[in-house]
Image (spheres, rainbow, N blue to C red):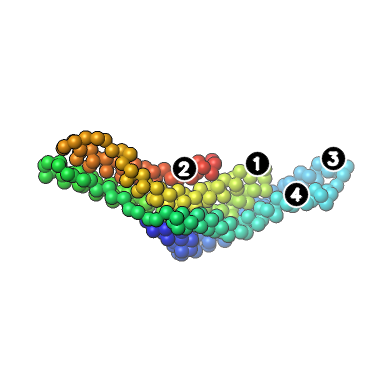
Amino acid sequence: MNASELTKSLAGYNSTVNDTANAIASATRPLAIIIISIFFLIEMDSWWKTMKQEGGGLTSELWMEIAFKYIIAYMLVMMTGRIFGAILEISNIAIKMINHVVPASSVDFNSELGHIKGWFIKNVITFIGGGTQFVAKLSTKLIVMMRFFQMYLLKAIGPLLVAFFVSDITRPTAINILKYFGAAAFQGVLVFIVLRLYPALVTSDLLSINMSGTWESWVTAFTSIAKGIIFIFLLWGSQRQAKSLLGVM
């Protein structure tokens, strides 16, 4: 896969879906501001009752302490799209840097039939090998598509969820959505690393078994197919790995 497919911006991958996500985010942003305002009024009422019981008042220091987290929440709501764009750009820069130092190479999962006899067996193994290679290429495309779709989804609902940053109880929700987007962006880095490392790994013949004659051809054929299956599992495991590394709950 070319690095350009993994380093596209949200607008560059699909401008129509990106515009739709922006429209949804704009529609939910006023509701997010209302949520922040409700939390603010509840907290001010709580502080007012507390100060009234103690016979004091709200000092400027207390005002600043209360206002700070609401200012942060407001900025998160208004700048969610830019924050997500910056996170994605950091991942894209990492992919471009890796692509600069590690050249692209392809992996062929087609089986070497060699001394295997039998027209039917040869065609079955060829079909399995070709099918494995097709599934591997399709998996790469699907993972990229699912990654971008997840980022579009998070961008659409982002303003609504980051509004909960104002409360200590609900703050993990706001932080978690940032982590989820970071994991989706970082998955692109992991997928690209797999695409660059795996060809070098399989060419070292770590799965090779010393056999001779017809058995050698059988082992070579099924080893090639096994490499393809492992490659597919590594690709699909990249999302779980990205979430695990970023501590996404």
Mark 2 vs mark 3: in front: 2
Tag 3–tag 1 contact (CB < 8 Å)? no
Quarter of the picture containing the N terminus is bottom left
Q: Which badge, 4 or 2, comes first in the chain's sequence? A: 4
Query: What mark, if any, has residue 152 been given in the picture?
Result: none
The residue drawn where x is 63% and y is 44% is 170
Q: CA distance from mark 2 to mark 3?
A: 52 Å
The residue drawn where x is 68% and y is 53% is 72
Q: Which badge, 4 or 3, comes first in the chain's sequence? A: 3
Q: Nearer the viewer, residue 115 or 166?
A: 115
Asked if residue 47 lies left or right of residue 72, the reply is: right
Residue at mark 1: 169
Residue at mark 3: 53
Query: What mark, if any, has residue 66 been given in the picture?
Result: 4
Q: Which badge, 4 or 1, comes first in the chain's sequence? A: 4
Query: What mark, if any, has residue 241 been given in the picture?
Result: 2
